[in-house]
DNA sequence: CAGGCAGCGGGAAACGTTTCCGGGGTGGCT
DNA sequence: AGCCACCCCGGAAACGTTTCCCGCTGCCTG
């Protein structure tokens, strides 16, 4: 470990016998003299020069970095997004910073605030909730931001949305069409954005299938719990015991739906013979479960890709008005509801 | 969008009526005069000053950033690592850069080379393979590196390893103990590091259980395929048809093992009654499958945590000799082999 | 009472680039 | 052949910090 100080542009200049301005120009392609370029390159190789991106950032006022902030990278939906975002950014020479904010909203706001420290040129944000303080912070950012998720219409920020309401409705309609009449719904917490939207979609689906009056508020077949496997299992067991006539269950995500499948198995009910099951998010879990789980894809990968594209456009200097893209959901039917 | 230029330390100094040195000292806690601190803080709030981390980095020669490089964040093992690494680093004030290198070895070397651009203070690397060029690059890095995975003993770099050979052996011994006599193994490609190690572990397990002579090379119950669900399913179907007397199957990862479960179900064999199944990696898939899949955990989360700790120690200035930590595997027994 | 020392604050340099500006040389046009 | 214009290259400033160094003030001590 020699710990020699890294060579700077000055040493290159000395070795090449030219000025530092010429070195900089040669390296950035702002010179036409082939001889100069050759000499500089030779010197660069000789001293083993590598530019300092920090110094470049200070001077050029951009860092080549973009942050992606979400609750938890362990969540399959966010994971899919990262898998698309990272290569897209890398291809354009941007590095990706990952911020897992956890369930803490303060952390989220902290990320937004830290944008002012200008270590990134842009941000893709998946907010858990959107509070007034979020909106305030979003209005004031110095760098472009793309928000994935629901956002009030008057916030001037690029926005990519899934439509989980339509997604849930799609699932319900599919189940009804397959002959189900008593369709239960196990949702996540109602005070989350997706929990709320999926609930609304479920109700609309019932109404459009003629299975419930639009103003029916009894919700006897609806349960709210966490977006987790065990939660789904427990809740499903309870629900199915209380209502043995249920002939279909929609889980608000694949984990819940997996829990439902387990509960049904424990209760000795056949899937899809006795009860049909559909999940949401269409994660890898769905394809490998038994029976393979029908699931509503909310296009996480697409949302990630589109967010990256929008951000790259902004970084490229585009100052068109903020865009609002909604990615349509799609239902993948597998055996669990066939 | 006012796009006003961000205030610098100079404006704070002007507003507070002090010098920029005093502002810097006050903000970094290097001043004892409470009055000064108060005035500076007031001025900071008044002008809305936020320090530029880029300028700070240039001056202080560290960036507060650490990179994590692996093949694909979609891989459950890497994902678990990130989930531990990120909070650990964040708690110490470091930001995390994510590099998905893909299957391309050049990309990996590129990441190593880019360390010289000093936009990070350290790196955690999960190399796919370790070539001479890797070793060379690792010897020359200017910043601390921690490698997760197998590394030649003479490379002077902190190293965290799993022991998938022992892991596979553990699984085989467990199956033998449960009464299995004809234990099959569906491995990934033999020319990958884990494929090779798991194969060795399988053979040792058989030998130690007295189910095969140590020099038996027939491998009639071994198959090599990809580390994927469909591959595991197809291969298992073929294997189980050719050898109906197989009473246990070890899958080289959970995806393969899930494929095995599906194949067994299609063939009408009961799990674990007729055939016991064990997977490896202990991903979320294992707990939610049916029946729940026994799986060998290779301690991805622990490896991530330990790697982060080692790196943080280096960043803290520790220059003890490189450390080599091996995380022991552990078997989680679930219904599929009970 | 005077001198010295400690501590605080200001000026300025430095980190490693990019880029503006200006001077000198060359080539082309008149 | 002379003049003008353009092209190249070098010098220097600037990006926004931190920190070294030095001078000043005030207090304590001899």
Image (tube, coloured by chain):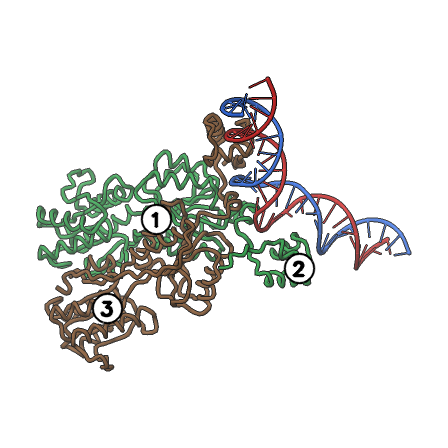
Chain colours: A green, B brown, C red, D blue
Q: Nearer the viewer, residue A40 or B79?
A: A40
Cα distance, mark 1 to mark 3?
A: 30 Å
Q: Chain of mark 1?
A: B
- Say whether residue B189 is left or right of residue A52: left
Q: Chain of mark 2?
A: A
Mark 2 secondary-structure assignment: helix
Q: Residue B260, percent across and down?
A: 21, 68
Q: Residue A87, percent across and down?
A: 43, 57
Mark 1 secondary-structure assignment: helix
Q: Nearer the viewer, residue A150 or B30?
A: B30
Cα distance, mark 2 to mark 1?
A: 45 Å
Q: Say few, some or many: other residues with alpha carbon within 10 Å of mark 1 (under 14 / 14 to 19 / 20 or more).
A: some
- Say whether residue D26 is left or right of residue B327: right
Q: Specify the quadrant that holds the C terminus of chain B.
A: bottom left
Disc marking residue A16: 2
Q: Nearer the viewer, residue A119 or B325?
A: B325
Disc marking residue B168: 3
Residue located beneath label 1 in the image? B88
């Amino acid at each position: 470990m020699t710990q020699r100080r890294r060579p700077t542009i000055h040493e290159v200049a000395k070795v090449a016998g030219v000025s530092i301005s010429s070195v900089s120009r040669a390296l950035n392609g702002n010179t036409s003299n082939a001889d100069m370029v050759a000499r500089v390159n030779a010197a660069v190789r000789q001293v083993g020069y590598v530019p300092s991106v920090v110094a470049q950032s200070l001077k050029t006022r951009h860092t080549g970095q973009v942050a992606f902030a979400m609750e938890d990278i362990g969540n399959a939906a966010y994971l899919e997004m990262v898998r698309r975002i990272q290569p897209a950014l890398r291809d354009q020479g941007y590095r990706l910073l990952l911020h897992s904010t956890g369930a803490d909203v303060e952390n989220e706001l902290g990320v937004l605030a830290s944008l002012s420290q200008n270590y990134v040129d842009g941000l893709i944000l998946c907010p858990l909730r959107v509070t007034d303080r979020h909106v305030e912070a979003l209005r004031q950012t110095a760098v472009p931001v793309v928000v994935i998720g629901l956002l009030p219409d008057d916030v001037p920020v690029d926005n990519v949305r899934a439509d989980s309401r339509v997604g849930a409705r799609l699932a319900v309609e599919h189940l009804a069409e397959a002959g189900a009449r008593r369709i239960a719904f196990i949702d996540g917490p109602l005070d989350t954005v997706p929990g709320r939207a999926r609930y609304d979609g479920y109700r609309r689906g019932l109404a459009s299938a003629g299975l419930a009056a639009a103003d029916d508020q009894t919700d006897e077949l609806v349960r709210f719990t966490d977006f987790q496997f065990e939660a789904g299992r427990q809740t499903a067991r309870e629900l199915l015991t209380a209502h043995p006539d249920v002939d279909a269950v929609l889980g608000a995500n694949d984990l819940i739906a997996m829990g439902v499948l387990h509960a049904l198995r424990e209760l000795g009910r056949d899937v899809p013979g006795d009860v049909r099951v559909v999940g949401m998010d269409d994660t890898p879990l769905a394809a490998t479960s038994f029976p393979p789980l029908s699931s509503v894809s909310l296009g996480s990968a697409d949302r990630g890709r589109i967010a990256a594209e929008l951000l790259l456009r902004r970084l490229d200097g585009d100052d068109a008005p903020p865009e609002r893209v909604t990615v349509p959901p799609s239902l993948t039917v597998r055996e669990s509801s066939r």
